[in-house]
Amino acid sequence: MEAAKFFAAGHTRADVAERCGVSGRSAHAWHRVWSREGAAALQATMKPGPVAKFSAEEVAVLEQELRRGPVAHGYDNALGTLPRVGRLMAETFQRKTSPSEVWRRLRRMRWSPQKPQASGARARRREDHRMERPALAATQGQGSKRAAHHCLRG
Protein backbone atom coordinates (compact mmCIF):
# COMPACT_ATOMS: atom_id res chain seq x y z
CA MET A 1 0.00 0.00 0.00
CA GLU A 2 1.21 3.49 -0.79
CA ALA A 3 0.59 4.74 2.74
CA ALA A 4 3.15 2.31 4.16
CA LYS A 5 5.76 3.64 1.73
CA PHE A 6 4.97 7.24 2.75
CA PHE A 7 5.15 6.40 6.47
CA ALA A 8 8.48 4.59 5.95
CA ALA A 9 9.80 7.64 4.07
CA GLY A 10 8.99 9.81 7.11
CA HIS A 11 5.89 11.64 5.83
CA THR A 12 3.43 12.94 8.42
CA ARG A 13 -0.06 11.50 8.85
CA ALA A 14 -1.58 14.72 7.49
CA ASP A 15 0.66 14.46 4.41
CA VAL A 16 -0.30 10.81 3.90
CA ALA A 17 -3.98 11.69 4.28
CA GLU A 18 -3.70 14.38 1.61
CA ARG A 19 -1.67 12.21 -0.80
CA CYS A 20 -3.98 9.20 -0.42
CA GLY A 21 -7.21 11.23 -0.46
CA VAL A 22 -8.47 10.05 2.92
CA SER A 23 -9.42 11.69 6.19
CA GLY A 24 -6.87 12.45 8.88
CA ARG A 25 -8.60 9.92 11.11
CA SER A 26 -8.04 7.16 8.53
CA ALA A 27 -4.39 8.13 8.11
CA HIS A 28 -3.96 8.07 11.89
CA ALA A 29 -5.51 4.57 12.09
CA TRP A 30 -3.28 3.40 9.24
CA HIS A 31 -0.20 4.79 10.97
CA ARG A 32 -1.09 3.03 14.20
CA VAL A 33 -1.55 -0.31 12.39
CA TRP A 34 1.62 0.23 10.34
CA SER A 35 3.73 1.05 13.39
CA ARG A 36 2.49 -2.02 15.31
CA GLU A 37 2.21 -4.66 12.60
CA GLY A 38 4.13 -3.41 9.57
CA ALA A 39 3.26 -2.76 5.94
CA ALA A 40 1.67 -6.19 5.41
CA ALA A 41 -1.13 -5.26 7.83
CA LEU A 42 -2.19 -2.42 5.53
CA GLN A 43 -2.93 -4.70 2.59
CA ALA A 44 -6.48 -4.46 1.26
CA THR A 45 -8.85 -7.15 2.47
CA MET A 46 -12.02 -8.54 0.99
CA LYS A 47 -15.19 -6.52 1.37
CA PRO A 48 -17.04 -7.02 4.64
CA GLY A 49 -20.18 -9.07 4.86
CA PRO A 50 -21.16 -12.60 4.04
CA VAL A 51 -19.93 -14.44 0.97
CA ALA A 52 -22.27 -14.03 -2.01
CA LYS A 53 -24.79 -16.87 -2.30
CA PHE A 54 -24.73 -16.80 -6.10
CA SER A 55 -21.73 -16.27 -8.35
CA ALA A 56 -21.80 -13.85 -11.28
CA GLU A 57 -22.11 -16.84 -13.65
CA GLU A 58 -25.09 -18.17 -11.73
CA VAL A 59 -26.77 -14.77 -11.79
CA ALA A 60 -26.27 -14.65 -15.58
CA VAL A 61 -27.83 -18.12 -15.92
CA LEU A 62 -30.76 -17.08 -13.73
CA GLU A 63 -31.34 -13.95 -15.80
CA GLN A 64 -31.29 -16.02 -18.98
CA GLU A 65 -33.83 -18.46 -17.53
CA LEU A 66 -36.06 -15.63 -16.28
CA ARG A 67 -36.04 -14.03 -19.73
CA ARG A 68 -37.35 -17.31 -21.19
CA GLY A 69 -40.47 -16.72 -19.09
CA PRO A 70 -42.70 -18.88 -16.89
CA VAL A 71 -44.48 -20.50 -19.85
CA ALA A 72 -41.14 -21.95 -21.05
CA HIS A 73 -40.76 -23.52 -17.61
CA GLY A 74 -44.09 -25.33 -17.76
CA TYR A 75 -46.53 -22.80 -16.30
CA ASP A 76 -49.75 -22.01 -18.14
CA ASN A 77 -49.51 -18.23 -17.74
CA ALA A 78 -46.84 -15.54 -17.70
CA LEU A 79 -47.00 -14.68 -14.00
CA GLY A 80 -43.51 -14.64 -12.50
CA THR A 81 -44.30 -15.02 -8.80
CA LEU A 82 -41.72 -15.31 -6.01
CA PRO A 83 -42.56 -18.99 -5.38
CA ARG A 84 -42.14 -19.76 -9.07
CA VAL A 85 -38.81 -17.94 -9.28
CA GLY A 86 -37.72 -19.67 -6.06
CA ARG A 87 -38.61 -23.04 -7.55
CA LEU A 88 -36.67 -22.15 -10.71
CA MET A 89 -33.64 -21.22 -8.60
CA ALA A 90 -33.90 -24.46 -6.61
CA GLU A 91 -34.15 -26.57 -9.76
CA THR A 92 -31.38 -24.71 -11.58
CA PHE A 93 -28.83 -24.43 -8.75
CA GLN A 94 -29.92 -27.28 -6.41
CA ARG A 95 -30.23 -24.75 -3.58
CA LYS A 96 -33.39 -23.84 -1.73
CA THR A 97 -33.90 -20.10 -1.23
CA SER A 98 -36.44 -18.28 0.90
CA PRO A 99 -38.96 -15.92 -0.70
CA SER A 100 -37.13 -12.97 0.87
CA GLU A 101 -33.83 -14.13 -0.68
CA VAL A 102 -35.56 -14.50 -4.06
CA TRP A 103 -36.91 -10.96 -3.68
CA ARG A 104 -33.47 -9.55 -2.77
CA ARG A 105 -31.81 -11.39 -5.68
CA LEU A 106 -34.38 -10.03 -8.14
CA ARG A 107 -33.95 -6.48 -6.79
CA ARG A 108 -30.13 -6.75 -7.09
CA MET A 109 -30.64 -7.83 -10.70
CA ARG A 110 -32.81 -4.71 -11.15
CA TRP A 111 -35.93 -6.71 -11.88
CA SER A 112 -39.09 -5.04 -10.65
CA PRO A 113 -42.51 -6.46 -9.82
CA GLN A 114 -44.88 -6.20 -12.74
CA LYS A 115 -48.57 -6.83 -12.94
CA PRO A 116 -49.34 -8.19 -16.42
CA GLN A 117 -52.22 -6.57 -18.25
CA ALA A 118 -53.85 -7.14 -21.56
CA SER A 119 -52.06 -4.96 -24.10
CA GLY A 120 -55.38 -3.66 -25.45
CA ALA A 121 -56.38 -2.28 -22.04
CA ARG A 122 -53.01 -0.55 -21.66
CA ALA A 123 -53.22 0.96 -25.13
CA ARG A 124 -56.83 2.04 -24.60
CA ARG A 125 -55.94 3.74 -21.31
CA ARG A 126 -52.91 5.43 -22.89
CA GLU A 127 -55.09 6.82 -25.70
CA ASP A 128 -57.63 8.07 -23.15
CA HIS A 129 -54.89 10.02 -21.35
CA ARG A 130 -53.63 11.52 -24.59
CA MET A 131 -57.10 12.68 -25.51
CA GLU A 132 -57.78 14.26 -22.09
CA ARG A 133 -54.48 15.89 -21.23
CA PRO A 134 -53.17 17.93 -24.22
CA ALA A 135 -55.57 20.79 -23.49
CA LEU A 136 -54.30 20.90 -19.93
CA ALA A 137 -50.67 21.06 -21.09
CA ALA A 138 -51.49 23.75 -23.66
CA THR A 139 -53.16 26.00 -21.07
CA GLN A 140 -50.09 26.10 -18.86
CA GLY A 141 -48.51 28.89 -20.87
CA GLN A 142 -44.81 29.03 -21.60
CA GLY A 143 -43.80 25.88 -19.73
CA SER A 144 -40.88 23.75 -20.80
CA LYS A 145 -41.25 20.73 -23.04
CA ARG A 146 -40.43 18.60 -20.01
CA ALA A 147 -43.34 20.07 -18.04
CA ALA A 148 -45.74 19.47 -20.95
CA HIS A 149 -44.43 15.92 -21.31
CA HIS A 150 -44.95 15.34 -17.60
CA CYS A 151 -48.56 16.47 -17.87
CA LEU A 152 -49.18 14.02 -20.71
CA ARG A 153 -47.97 11.12 -18.61
CA GLY A 154 -49.97 12.08 -15.56
Image (spheres, rainbow, N blue to C red):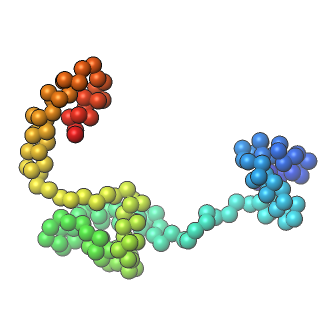
In terms of depth relative to the viewer, which is nearer, 142 or 86? 142
Q: Residue at x 35, y 78 (%)?
A: 90
Q: Is residue 16 above or below residue 61?
A: above
Tally the numbered discs: 0
Q: Is residue 10 left or right of residue 68?
A: right
Q: Quadrant of residue 74?
A: bottom left
Drawn side of residue 115 relative to residue 55, left or right: left
User: Residue at (38%, 80%) from the top-left corner?
Assistant: 96
Depth check: give the residue in front, 85 or 125. Answer: 125
Residue 52 horizontal/vertical position (percent): 51, 69
User: Which residue reaches farthest right?
Assistant: 10
Q: Quadrant of the N terminus?
A: bottom right
Residue 107 picture location, percent across and down = 38, 60
Name the residue at 10% across, 39% down: 127
Name the quarter where the C terminus is drawn: top left
Q: Residue 154 vs residue 106: left or right?
A: left
Residue 140, image x, y percentages? 23, 24
| Viewer can see residue 88 | no
Q: Quadrant of residue 79?
A: bottom left
> From the viewer's perspective, is residue 108 above or below residue 97?
above
Residue 119 seen in the current view:
yes
View extreme (top): residue: 142
Where is residue 29, by image quadrant? bottom right
Q: Residue at x 18, y 67 (%)?
A: 71
- Residue nearest the viewer, comparing 55 with 14: 14
Q: Picture coordinates of residue 94 (x, y %)?
A: 38, 80
